[in-house]
Image (tube, rainbow, N blue to C red):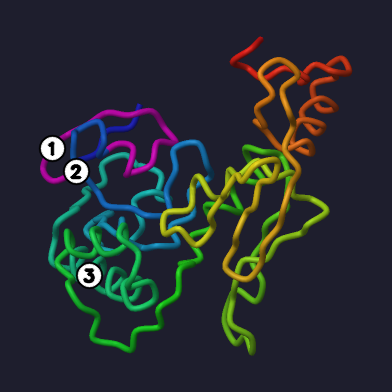
Amino acid sequence: MVELTIDNQRVKVKEGTTILEAADKLNISIPTLCHHENLTPLGSCRLCTVEVIVDGTSKLTTACTFPVEQGIKVRTTSRKALEARRLAAELLLAKCPTSVKVRNLAKEIGVDKPRIKVREEDCILCDLCVRTCREIVGRQAIKFINRGLNQSVEPHVDLSPDMCIGCGSCAYVCPTGAIKMEDKGDTRVIHGPKWEIEFKLKKCKVCGNYWAPEEQLEYITKSLDLPPGFFDVCPNCR
């Protein structure tokens, strides 16, 4: 076990626990937009920035990626931490001013209006869709293009049509609505920031309702070595 102090409260947690997880045990709320408990942490949104004091030296870090260390002190509401969060919130708000979730988080942090030029985009490059597709779905249909420094083309999320199975997990985890999913009749349409893809839905032999993409069901059938026709009937009629 590792013992540390968060906002003057002592807590013992297992080695490998992140500051964000340790703070949650103390019911200390730290804002975040790119974090999901079932995915590898990335810290791209920077909203969970905290101040950590190690051997008398202070530094800023993202709470979702920093594993706890014995004896460290964490300040979640120090001046340095709050200033860093406000800057991160301002950048996100300038990029996605129409996103309700971004606006609400920014307001909680104390930012009502960005001081920099508004770009009016949807994608904040949080990587949730990429990580979900890779780590949970088991595919790599979504990836970042031109992310990093000194890029001549604006970074964005791209889709590999041959890898996508239409499950819609990317739309489910997207915090800003940059990726949307819509089922119409026998077709599912997934809309991305710069792409759109359609999938034929499976029709239940009992109720006649269309309920899941055929490609997704074929992928699951092969992955789990299920018998042919296993998904001919929807879950509600099974």
Which amino acid lies under the numbered mark 3 shown in the image of this protein?
A: Arg
When asked about the image quadrant of residue 206, the answer is top right
Q: Nearer the viewer, mark 3 or mark 2?
A: 3
> What is the distance, in whole Å, between disc 3 and disc 2 at their CAs?
20 Å
> What is the distance, in whole Å, between disc 2 and disc 1 at their CAs?
5 Å
As for residue 238 lying within the magenta part, the answer is no
Asked which secondary structure carries label 3, the reply is helix
Nearer the observer, 11 or 41: 41
At 18% from the left and 53% from the top, the residue drawn is: 75
Asked which secondary structure carries label 2, the reply is strand
Q: Quadrant of the C terminus?
A: top right
Residue on which the image places disc 3: 86
Q: Quadrant of the N terminus?
A: top left
The stretch of residues the image draws in magenta is 6-22
Question: Compared to 230, does 118 lie above or below?
Answer: below
Question: Compared to 227, does 114 lie above or below?
Answer: below
Q: Answer with left or right where residue 174 lies relative to residue 5.
A: right
Pinpoint residue 146: horizontal percent, then vertical percent. 65, 76
Residue on which the image places disc 1: 9
Quick one: label 2, few (<14), some, or many (20+) residues within 10 Å? many
Pinpoint residue 179: horizontal percent, then vertical percent. 54, 58
At 26% from the left and 46% from the top, the residue drawn is: 72
Quick one: label 1, few (<14), some, or many (20+) residues within 10 Å? few
What mark, if any, has residue 6 been given in the picture? 2
Q: Nearer the viewer, mark 3 or mark 1?
A: 3
**For the residues bearing labels 2 and 1, Cβ distance under 8 angstroms:** yes
**For the residues bearing labels 3 and 2, Cβ distance under 8 angstroms:** no
